[in-house]
Image (tube, coloured by chain):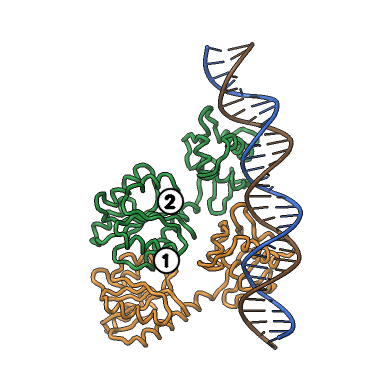
Chain colours: A orange, B green, C blue, D brown
Amino acid sequence: MSAFIVIVEDEEDILELIEYNLEKEGFDTIGFTSTKNVAQLLEEEPVDLLIMDRNLPGVEGSEFVAQMRDIGVETPVIYLSAKNKESDIEEGFERGGDDYITKPFNMKELVLRIKAVLKRTKKDKTEGKVIYRDITLDLGSRELFIENRNIELTKLEFDLLHTLIGNQNIVLDRDYLLEHVWGGDAIYQDRTVNVAINRLKEKIDPDKSKEYIKTVRGVGYTLC
Amino acid sequence: MSAFIVIVEDEEDILELIEYNLEKEGFDTIGFTSTKNVAQLLEEEPVDLLIMDRNLPGVEGSEFVAQMRDIGVETPVIYLSAKNKESDIEEGFERGGDDYITKPFNMKELVLRIKAVLKRTKKDKTEGKVIYRDITLDLGSRELFIENRNIELTKLEFDLLHTLIGNQNIVLDRDYLLEHVWGGDAIYQDRTVNVAINRLKEKIDPDKSKEYIKTVRGVGYTLC
DNA sequence: AGCCTCTGTAACCATTTTGTTACATAGCCT
DNA sequence: AGGCTATGTAACAAAATGGTTACAGAGGCT
């Protein structure tokens, strides 16, 4: 299980310790000694977990998270805190934090908590369904239903349809699709997208009567 | 996501480090140790991002960017700075910079910031709607609506109409259109614009009653 | 290993889009 | 009005683009 974890902790040695241990576990981490610049990162990148010191100089860590929640950032949070009074813990949870760990803590415990939170949120993310017209994509079981008929899709086809539905009414160009469906560093030809799209089209609309996927000549594809 | 990135940093080893890492990420980079020659490049080439040291000997980095903005260069900027006093950061943003990163920084963070800025500026370009009289251009779905009727446009026609609407009340000459719609380095005849404009006119106003696009004899075309 | 599925690539073809050219028309000047 | 130039129009050719198919390699499963 790889994940991108942001750590905010003003004591540099603790920050480094945490980063060292998490990277050893195979996580991608990025550390900050203040909340500065963190908000933007959370807004713009898919961060899997935020580890946040409650006792930062200046802004309260939980206050910061509350602001994030207000603008719609749902990144799960594990709070670090030297405090361990009951009231503080409750306050932390109240504001939408997902877990709470008091200093001093050992690394084993932190890693366990992290894995637990990630597992929980991963489930949340992949539960539920995406619907477009008479297409239903079950993200949990990764099944596709069209007019309640189950249609088998390969992983690639599923991911492709998923991002198309997730961006309906927006024309996605081949570069975007290559990056998001195939993966950021993959080097493929854009004709690859072409073929993949048409294999998907064939599966979801064999007699070409529905026109789910529209090709926008010179640009890309869209679900509209 | 490939992009053309210009880096201005007087310390050569840092410059090389940045270039090395960005090229590893698949970006095209060009480095300068002073602002000399950078202005010209920004004016003449479509640069996606400028990474600018604030602490250059001689001209202040942000001063340079301010001058660029004055002559209409909108390239997004990420500032590098050893300073981290609050006032400096605010000043950097005030002058139109898009992001700010303080030394020492790790490459991972820089790359993340870069991707975030690129995504943001790309999104700005491809999101939302442009409206002129009863014409609505949806940049996401690349659809044209006139009086709520959907009219199909080819890529070229769409881009052409987009830049016309984006510069309404300004007469655009053929050279400008060739450069911005067809692309900077392409060599076409200016009659090409002519024909393209008229094909567009035909589509958006078949019975020639609306006069959306006005031809300015001897100069070019405008939407007024 | 053998078989199967999935997927990237290349080749081919049909279609659309676009550049160019030639000619007609319209605007502007004397 | 006549003549000149710029622009519109239509037809054609070239180029770009995407669909389709076939094939081969990769990976998984028995």
In which image quadrant can residue A79 be found?
bottom left
Camera-side residue: B62 or A35? B62
To which chain does the residue with label 2 belong?
Answer: B
For marks 2 and 1, give the CA distance: 32 Å
* Residue density around tag 2, few if under 14, some if 14–19, many if 20 or more, within 10 Å: some
Residue for point 58% across, 36% down: B189
Image depth: mark 2 or mark 1 in front: 2
Q: Amino acid at mark 2?
A: Val
Residue at position x 67%, y 63% in the image: A198
| Residue for point 66% across, 61% down | A212
Visible in this render: residue A113?
yes
Task: Give residue B47's mark.
Answer: 2
What residue is at 47 percent from the left and 55 percent from the top?
B122
Which image quarter: residue A7?
Answer: bottom left
Residue D29 in picture, x, y percent from top left: 66, 85
Q: Which residue is mark 1?
A: A72
Which one is in front, B3 or B127? B3
Tell me which chain the residue with mark 1 is part of. Answer: A
- Measured as percent of width and height from the top left, residue A155 is found at 61, 73
**Label 1 element class:** loop
- The label shown at residue A154 is none
